Image (cartoon, rainbow, N blue to C red):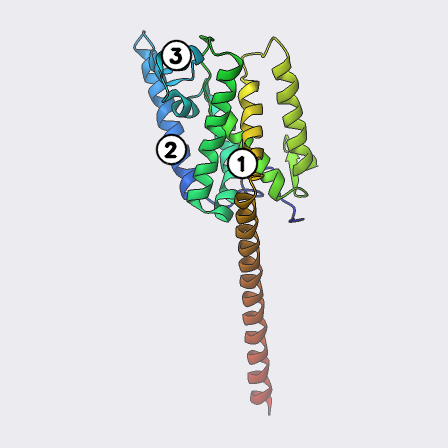
Amino acid sequence: MSRNRGRFSGIGIGGGWTPAVKALTIACVVAFVLQIVDQWTGQPSFTYKFGLTPALVTQHYYLWQLVTYIFLHAGFFHILFNLLGLYMFGSELESIWGTKEFTKYFFICGIGAAIASILVGPQSLVATIGASGAIYGLLLAYGVLFPNRIIYLYMIIPIQAKWFVVIFGAIAFLSSMSASGGGVAHIAHLGGMLVGFMYLKGGRVFSDIRWRYDRWHRNRLRRKFEVYYNERRRDDDDQQKWRRWRN
């Protein structure tokens, strides 16, 4: 496992603006704008149709809500922190796994979180929205691949990724046991993490992910060595030229 250190910020953790992360970000922003426009009409129905309402899924078979709820958000800070987490954790995971595997994992966690919410309250009329369940799945994967990497909690407190995952998983679990969830879908958060863990521990898939990471790490080290070797060779050539000029 990597022991490199990274900061809890886009610069320290993010692996760049990768294709799937970029597409998911754009989709969330577009959906958020549509939500705002829908509210301006005076008769908002966008969240009703595309948010996750367990009763509509179990009784009226609104199965598309298992996916569409991921792209809807309750407010500016809700979407801001979810997209921040998507960039910081998702970009590096996508750069290691590849776009196809990363996208599949993201939606598996998101749909798994939705199913967990439905199983807990199949007749509920309360809509759940947001990518938090999928983001928690990404956080779990990041903790598995980079357990000793340092993350700065609240930009201040240094903590290893594995303990970061444990803390947030415990918060989601304890909150899900409480009757008052404060409007936060803690069951979805916990469901996203559990489904992600089950998927990663699925044997061949996890081995393939580790193999991809090891290959990425070897290629990264090779590129660094090539840069170092070329610089040393260039310096040696310059010194040889200087000696010949002096002679």
- The quadrant in which the C terminus is found is bottom right
Question: In 3D space, how far apart are the residues under numbered discs 3 and 1 (Cα atoms)?
Answer: 27 Å
Query: At which x and y percent is residue 66?
Result: 41, 23
Provide the residue designation for mark 1: 199
Name which residue type carries label 2: Ile
Dividing the picture into quarters, in which one does residue 214 lie? bottom right
- Give me the residue at 54% from left, 36% from top: 199
Reply above or below: 195 against 93.
Answer: above
Which is nearer the N-term, disc 2 or disc 1? 2
Q: How many numbered discs sit on the rendered protein?
A: 3
Name which residue type carries label 1: Tyr
Query: At which x and y percent is residue 168?
Result: 64, 27
Secondary structure at badge 2 equals helix
Dividing the picture into quarters, in which one does residue 157 lie? top right
Reply above or below: 107 against 225.
Answer: above
Q: Which of 152 and 28 is in front in this view?
A: 28
Q: Which residue lies furthest to the left in this view?
A: 41
Dividing the picture into quarters, in which one does residue 6 lie? top right
**Circle 1 crowding by C-alpha within 10 Å: few under 14, some 14–19, many from 20:** some
Which is nearer the N-term, disc 3 or disc 2? 2
- Give me the residue at 47% from left, 32% from top: 108
Provide the residue designation for mark 2: 26
Secondary structure at badge 3 equals helix
Name which residue type carries label 3: Leu
Provide the residue designation for mark 3: 56
Residue 245 appears in view: yes
- 78 sits to left or right of 28: right
Which is nearer the N-term, disc 3 or disc 1? 3
